[in-house]
Every structure is written in C-alpha cells, then in structure tokens.
Amino acid sequence: LAQVERQARALVTQCCAQPAAAALAGYSEAAQWTRASQGAEATGLLAGGLSPLPSITAVGEHLFALMPQLEQERREGGQEQVHWLPDILDAVVDTAIQKVVQIRQLTQAGAQQLIADLEYLHKVTDAIGREAAQGSPVAGAGGGVAGAGPGTENMAAARLAEVLAALTFLASQ
C-alpha cells in the first residue's frame, strides 16, 4: 500500500509540475543569455530592475493557479490529507535548476537577467511554501512545510536561494 501511495504521489506531482516544465522547455537556449548590455530599453529594464522572462512568470502563474485547487483538497480532506505543495515546488525548482545549468554561454547582461528570473521564482516559491506551512494543521513551529519532513524548511525556496547567491557572487566578479 505504501508503494502505491508513493507512486500516486509521484504521478500527481509530475502532472502538477508538467505545465511548468513545458513553460521552461526552451529556457536554456534563450537569446537573453548571450546579449551584450545595450541600455535600459533593450534589456527590459523597468523602474525596479529587470523583468523576469515570460517563461518564468508563466511558472509563477501556474503555481499560484494550483493554490486554490490544493487548498480545496485541504478543506475537504481533513487531518489525513496529503500535502502536495512541497513535492510540487521541489519538482518545479528541480526543473528550473536543470535548465539554468544547461545554459552554455552567459554574458554579464545575461547573468543579470538570470538573477532577475531566479529572484522572481524564489519569491514565488517562498511565498507559496510559507502559505502552505501556515495553512497546514501539522506545520511545525519552526516554519517547516507540512509533508516535507519534520523540521524541514521550504527546501525549494532554500535551494533557489543557494543558486541565486552563487550566481550573484559569480556575476559580481
């Protein structure tokens, strides 16, 4: 029974993460990675900095669109319900990180765009992970995400923060 439950959990996670993977399909080949700095209008510079690429905002929109469906499951499922969000966030972040490491060439302007994209995705995963932890009847006092294991922080957002810190450091060199 436990094996069937793991398989079902993996299938649901895969189905929920698939639209994000589709949005990121060509991400590592984006032209932005090899562009030279050409001024504010050429790089998409807004008042607050660079805007995330449409593929990244599509991922965020998809994750936020999942929230009402998963919250409905929480209301209807009671204490025994499965907490899907940690696994879904992990799968989406895994896909995003895989796409990032597949980028073959990165200019300084491209690195700044990548930082903007990852900052956006980090904010989204952090907000959703916190929402899941706050709304969960089994979330620990340490801010852990239900279903992710005892004392576990929002691992998806934490991994993105690590990649973002490394990228920011490398871009400053």
Image: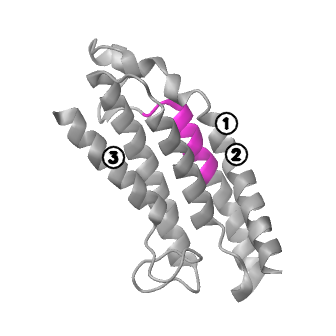
Q: Which residue of the protein is positioned furthest toward the front in this rendering? A: 3
Q: What stretch is highlighted in magenta?
A: 52-63
Could you tell me which quadrant the N terminus lies in? bottom right
Position of 165 with respect to 133 (left or right) is left
Position of 95 with respect to 42 (left or right) is right
The answer to whether residue 46 is seen in the rendering is no
Percent across and percent down for residue 3 are 79, 74
Amino acid type of disc 1? Answer: Ala
Could you tell me which quadrant the C terminus lies in? top left
Q: In this view, does 169 lie above or below 38?
A: below
Instruction: Indicate yes or no whether the magenta region holds residue 164.
Output: no
What number is the disc on residue 18? 2
Q: Which residue is drawn at 42% across and 44% down?
A: 120
Q: Which of marks 3 and 1 is nearer the N terminus?
A: 1
Instruction: Indicate yes or no whether the magenta region holds residue 55.
Output: yes
Amino acid type of disc 2? Answer: Gln
Q: Residue at x 69, y 88 (%)?
A: 79
Are the residues flagged by discs 2 and 3 in contact, CB closer than 8 Å?
no
What number is the disc on residue 22? 1
What number is the disc on residue 164? 3
